[in-house]
Amino acid sequence: MGIFIFGHKNPDTDSVASAIALSHLKQQLNHDTTACVLGNLNKETSFILDFFQVEPPKLLMDVKTQVMDLHHDTVLGIPPTTSILHAYKLMEAQRLETLAIVDDENKFLGIVSMKDIAMGLIKGNFEELKTSFENIVSDLKGIILTGGGSEVEGKLSVIAYYYKSVEGALSENDIIIVGDRYDIIECAVDSKVKLIILTGGMKIPKKYIQMATDNNVTILSTPFDTYYTSKIINQCNYISTIMRTKNIIKFNHHDYLDDVKEAMGNTHFRNYPVVDDYNTFIGFINRKHIMNPGKKKVILVDHNEYAQSVEGLKEAEIMEIIDHHKLGDIATSIPISFRNSPVGSTCTIIYQMYRENALQIPYSIAGLLLSGIISDTLYFKSPTTTKVDQDAVADLNKIVKLNLDTYAMDVFKAGTSLEGQSIEEIFYKDFKEFSLEGNRVGLSQVFTLDIEDVFNRKDEFILFIDKVSNNSNHDLTLLIITDILKEGSYLLFRCRNQHIISAAFHIEPYQGVFVQGIVSRKKQVVPQLLEGINSLK
């Protein structure tokens, strides 16, 4: 399945660009990786991907363990025209308890177990035969003396009577088993029966073969005696005559492990078939498979906290984390590669990894990395900016050759336009939750060049912030509206203790207050909130 690489929820340009670039780097190092996102792309990121003609990453909803992650038993299905005897021998040879019956396109039709075969031997219809001529020849190791055909369906009889006893009782629908009883054979040929099975490998006079040919009667010779032939003839029937099609519990390969466990807990079958969305048979799972399930492999970029990551992360195997934020709460059971650097963008770290591995950076990847750094550092205006970020952009621009001032403004214009977006969309486009000294804090940040549009809807934003705060039981819910040109931010908030706002930013805590120089949530807002909270203790 490979390794999924993704950033945080509500993806921004840095998280998306770093996921794509890291996936490309890993692929150059012969790793099977897929770049993913955990939500819809914002306008800025979409603009950048279009600019460099890069396909958007795969949308990943969760990394919960699914049936596809289990180490299922890979067993080939058999067609419904397979004989029961052949199916039994296959199960015995491969020590199988259950077989799947599939059509020509491997679509699931039903199942057969050893118990089904055993019950067929006890309760089966011993008077009828419905199978292919090929099955009879194969299972009885037969030799065709005359005739043939494709399908055989009729009434079975083992003839041990004097020929006068059956004279007039045979018809074209009969299939008879007989030894070297020429009188019976002649009577059967005259009656134009469907099939004569001659036991004991006996040879019969040519005249009877000629009679059978003239009457379009098929004669098959088997080396087995009459007793054995009569005992296994019913096992030449199609497997479809005993397969189960009802009350079968099967799983789709997308089904979650929790649902599988519940279904298995309420039933007592040994094996459960697995199919895909098109009912194509994949294999079987049973209780042993869910005892030690496989896990999805993931690499996290631009975050290292459960609250910011994908649903089901605790069920996945984290292979690596690359980030530039503070340490979060993610824990692993084994050592992993964890790279955390105090730079302005995760893309800067990915750029360094390309150089460390002496890998050439393609035009599109260079463009994404450069864009991620410009976006996350606000084109070097953010206090998170380092010389390492600036040097990385300078080096990457040798590949893409852009007018950086013009390009950066185009990026911000595309990303900060709020036209047509609802209050909820604007609030959640870059929203993160934190636990600060025991306080539940929700921080949303919006970068825009159109501050007027926000303040025209100021009251609506405040009502929405109140709703989020109540629903999430936040101690503080804060919307940071950052004006890139003025290099500061306006604040809208709901806070149980407004002294936190004044203590953190040294301002009077009223709705829409402007805080000069505050542009970074990570480097300024979070640390200052922590300082403000601690100062009030």
Image: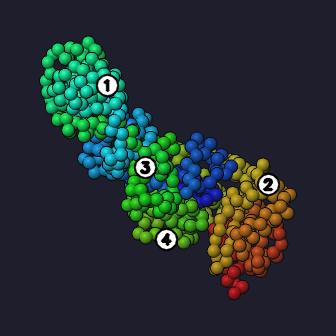
Where does the image place residue 495, in percent across and percent down from the top left?
A: 76, 75
Which quadrant of the figure contains the C terminus?
A: bottom right
Residue 127 visible in image: yes
Query: Disc 3 or disc 2, which is closer to the eye?
Result: 3
**Quadrant position of residue 83:** top left
Q: What is the number of callouts on the image? A: 4
| Earlier residue among tags 3 and 2 | 3
| Residue 505 picture location, percent across and down | 74, 75
Q: Which residue is tagged 3?
A: 273
Residue found at x 20% / y 39%: 228
Comparing marks 4 and 3, which lies closer to the viewer? 3
Circle 4 residue: 331
- Sequence-earlier tag: 4 or 2: 4
Q: Earlier in the sequence, mark 1 or mark 4?
A: 1
Of all residues shown, which one is farthest toward the bottom? 537
Residue carrying label 1: 169
Q: Amino acid at mark 2?
A: Asp
What residue type is disc 1 on?
A: Ala
Mark 4 or 2, closer to the camera: 4
Q: Residue at x 65, y 68 (%)?
A: 433
| In the image: residue 300, left or right of residue 533 | left
Q: Which mark is residue 450?
A: 2
Type of amino acid under label 3 = Pro
The residues tagged by marks 1 and 4 sit, at their Cα atoms, a distance apart of 81 Å
Q: Position of residue 280 (x, y in %)?
A: 45, 41
Question: Between residues 305 and 211, which one lies in front from this camera angle?
Answer: 211
